[in-house]
Amino acid sequence: MKLYGGIDPHSNNNVIALTDESDRMVYRKRLANDVETVLAALAP
């Protein structure tokens, strides 16, 4: 299964979204602008 992702950066947070080949939302989360937090969310 292929996944497609994007990050929408804002001044104090960002939204990470992943969709599959059928455009179904697999993951969507608003996170603080902290590198460790974002990396931890993307690790799995």
Image (cartoon, helix red, strand yellow):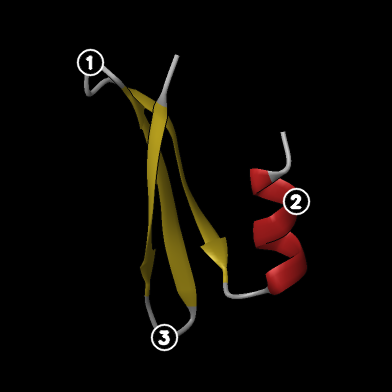
Give residue 11's mark.
Answer: 3
Q: Which residue is mark 2?
A: 40
Residue 1: quadrant of the picture: top left
The circle drawn on residue 22 is 1
Q: Nearer the viewer, residue 34 or 19?
A: 19
Q: Residue furthest bottom?
A: 11
Q: Amino acid at mark 2?
A: Ala
Give, as a three-letter code, the residue at label 1.
Answer: Ser
Q: CA distance from mark 2 to mark 1?
A: 26 Å
Dot 1: what SS? loop
Between circles 2 and 3, the one closer to the viewer is 2
* Picture residue at 64% right of the left edge, 46% below the top: 42
Quarter of the image where the C terminus is located: top right
Q: Work out whether mark 2 precedes mark 1 in sequence or the reverse, and give the earlier one.
A: 1
User: Horizontal and vertical percent for residue 40?
Assistant: 75, 51
Q: Position of residue 36 (x, y in %)?
A: 77, 66
- Residue 8 spot, x, y in % from top left: 34, 64
Label 2 vs 3, first from the N-terminus: 3
**Three-letter amino acid code at disc 3?**
Ser
